[in-house]
Image (spheres, rainbow, N blue to C red):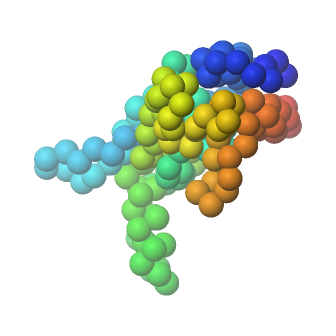
Amino acid sequence: MSIPASGSLDALFASARVALAAVPQEALGREKTPRWRTPRIVRAGSAWHVGALLIGDDAVFATAEVLRAAAPVRRGYAAESARARAERRAEASRGGFADGETVHVGWTPVDLAAVEAGGSSGPLALVGGVPSVRWSQAGGFMPLAGYLRERIDLLIAMAEH
């Protein structure tokens, strides 16, 4: 893999995109509530799902909700949370996603310029001058270059099988 050990965020993500070329992207969805119809989740693009990040062709996003589209089915639910998850899957199906297709909803753009300027955006921050990623809400930061190498190697291995 050719992710540099250091460099600008643009260079790191450009290298990541090249390394990910053989890995399929996943769908990005956006919630839409038409005036006279039921809510749905509609297609808003695609990106590679790399842990806490979604890497698009020209942007980077923080992940949020991940679901698989499924046609609405009437059934009893033991818990209200199961009913809510089924409704979200049905919203994606009504929006045109194929049954079983993975859809990312609620993602937010990451401001790479803000991170490069020493700030943070989404799961990314400059920590001690090193671009870093917080891989979970409760987790600490780790260097972004190593995180990308590890995650992309895993995705490539999974895609080959």
Residue lying farthest left?
A: 35
Number of callouts: 0
Look at the picture and state if 87 lies above or below 109: below
Q: Is residue 39 left or right of residue 67?
A: left
- Asked whether residue 78 appears in the rendered view, the answer is yes
- Residue 19 falls in image quadrant: top right
Q: Is residue 14 left or right of residue 114?
A: right
At x 70% / y 18%, what residue is drawn?
7
**Residue 96's spot in the image, x, y percent?**
40, 39
At x 49% / y 84%, what residue is drawn?
78
Look at the picture and state if 87 lies above or below 91: below
Q: Report the quarter where the C terminus lies.
A: top right
**Residue 8's spot in the image, x, y percent?**
64, 18
- Residue 138 falls in image quadrant: bottom right
Residue lying farthest front?
A: 128
**Residue 74's spot in the image, x, y percent?**
41, 70
Nearer-the-camera pick, 146 or 17: 146
Nearer-the-camera pick, 104 or 63: 63
Q: Report the quarter where the N terminus lies.
A: top right
Nearer-the-camera pick, 56 or 5: 5
